[in-house]
């Protein structure tokens, strides 16, 4: 039996990679870039994929001719991203860095943060700091796209343990609401043959109202929300919480 830590532990990303980043997720990213009005950027735009993981969006963005930089703190995920780029025959820059501290002021036309990669720092001030980093990295007029499972959505979906099977591997996920709906803890148990791996992730949940205030305090303007990548309203039928905002000229 082994035990891994949380999102800052490289062993976690290695052990749980196949469940976090299935081939379906890679295919979904390609489809979204092909169809979503929220992910339509000018040709050749400079894109920062902040929290890029194994290149789920970075690689197809590079394939479409964007000037892409992927930033992640996990060496293992960056290694996978570089291999995926090489296999696809595309060029992207990859940087190992903490998203609170990555600094390229004004260097990008677009900042992406996808698949609920925001809110994982224990100190809420650090999560606000990430938004300020995103703002700083954008050129004037640049766009932020931040994709989350919003608090309103999670309130509908926190259910008894979820069980997922991939081949012979079995994953059991149990979610627990903490601190009067401020945070969520996910406890994961992965059974792989006679080996059991356990991990816990804790992150802050945000409603649209809370996220709007944070984004505006970070300097963003024109904050808008959608309930899906098709641009639907953020209402009772929403599937995601997607924030789009701009750094003013």
Image (cartoon, grey):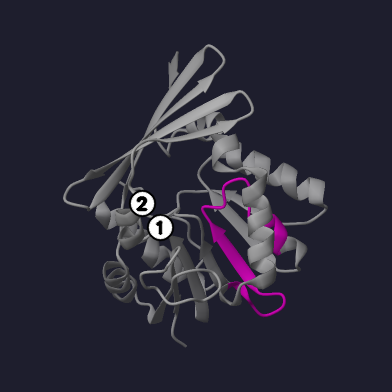
Residue 238, how many percent across, how many down? Answer: 42, 67
| Apparent side of residue 30 relative to residue 14 in the rendered image (left or right) | right
Residue to which mark 2 is pinned: 157
Residue 19, how many percent across, how many down? Answer: 56, 37
Determine which quarter of the picture holds residue 8: top left
| Mark 2 crowd level (few <14, some 14–19, many ≥20, 10 Å Cα) | few
Instruction: Give the residue drawn at x 50%, y 44%.
Output: 73
In depth, the one of 108 and 194 nearer the eye is 194
Residue 75 lies in the magenta stretch: no
Which residue sits furthest left? Answer: 180
Reply above or below: 44 against 205. Answer: below
Determine which quarter of the picture holds residue 230: bottom right
- Residues in magenta? 39-61
> From the viewer's perspective, is the residue at label 2 or at label 1 nearer?
2
Q: Is residue 223 visible?
A: yes
Reply above or below: 221 against 115. Answer: below
**Disc 2 and disc 1: Cα gap in Å?**
10 Å
Instruction: Assess whether mark 1 and mark 2 are in contact (beta carbons under 8 angstroms).
Output: yes
Q: Secondary structure at mark 2?
A: helix
Residue 34, how many percent across, how many down? Answer: 70, 69
Q: Earlier in the sequence, mark 2 or mark 1?
A: 1
| Apparent side of residue 5 relative to residue 77 in the rendered image (left or right) | left
Residue to which mark 1 is pinned: 149
Q: Which of the labelled discs sits on residue 51, or is there none?
A: none
In depth, the one of 144 and 152 nearer the eye is 152
Q: Secondary structure at mark 1?
A: loop
Q: Is residue 55 visible?
A: no
Determine which quarter of the picture holds residue 173: top left
Residue 53 lies in the magenta stretch: yes
| Mark 1 crowd level (few <14, some 14–19, many ≥20, 10 Å Cα) | many
């Amino acid at each position: 039996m082994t035990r891994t830590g949380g999102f800052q532990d490289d062993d976690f990303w290695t052990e749980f990679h196949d469940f976090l980043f299935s081939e379906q997720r890679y295919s979904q990213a390609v489809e979204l870039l092909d169809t979503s009005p929220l992910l339509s950027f000018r040709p050749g735009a400079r894109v920062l994929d902040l929290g890029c993981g194994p290149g789920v969006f970075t690689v197809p963005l590079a394939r479409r001719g964007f000037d892409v930089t992927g930033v992640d703190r996990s060496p293992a995920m960056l290694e996978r991203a570089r291999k995926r780029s090489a296999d696809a025959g595309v060029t992207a820059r990859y940087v190992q860095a903490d998203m609170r501290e990555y600094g390229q002021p004004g260097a990008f036309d677009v900042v992406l943060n996808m698949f609920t990669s925001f809110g994982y720092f224990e100190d809420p001030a650090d999560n606000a700091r990430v938004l300020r980093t995103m703002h700083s990295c954008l050129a004037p007029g640049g766009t932020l796209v931040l994709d989350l499972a919003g608090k309103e959505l999670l309130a509908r979906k926190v259910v008894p343990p979820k069980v997922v099977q991939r081949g012979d591997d079995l994953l059991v996920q149990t979610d627990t609401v903490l601190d009067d709906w401020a945070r969520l803890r996910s406890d994961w148990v992965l059974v792989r043959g006679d080996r059991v791996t356990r991990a816990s992730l804790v992150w802050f949940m945000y409603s649209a109202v809370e996220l709007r205030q944070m984004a505006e305090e970070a300097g963003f303007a024109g904050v808008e929300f959608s309930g899906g990548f098709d641009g639907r309203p953020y209402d009772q039928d929403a599937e995601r919480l997607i924030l789009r905002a701009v750094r003013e000229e």
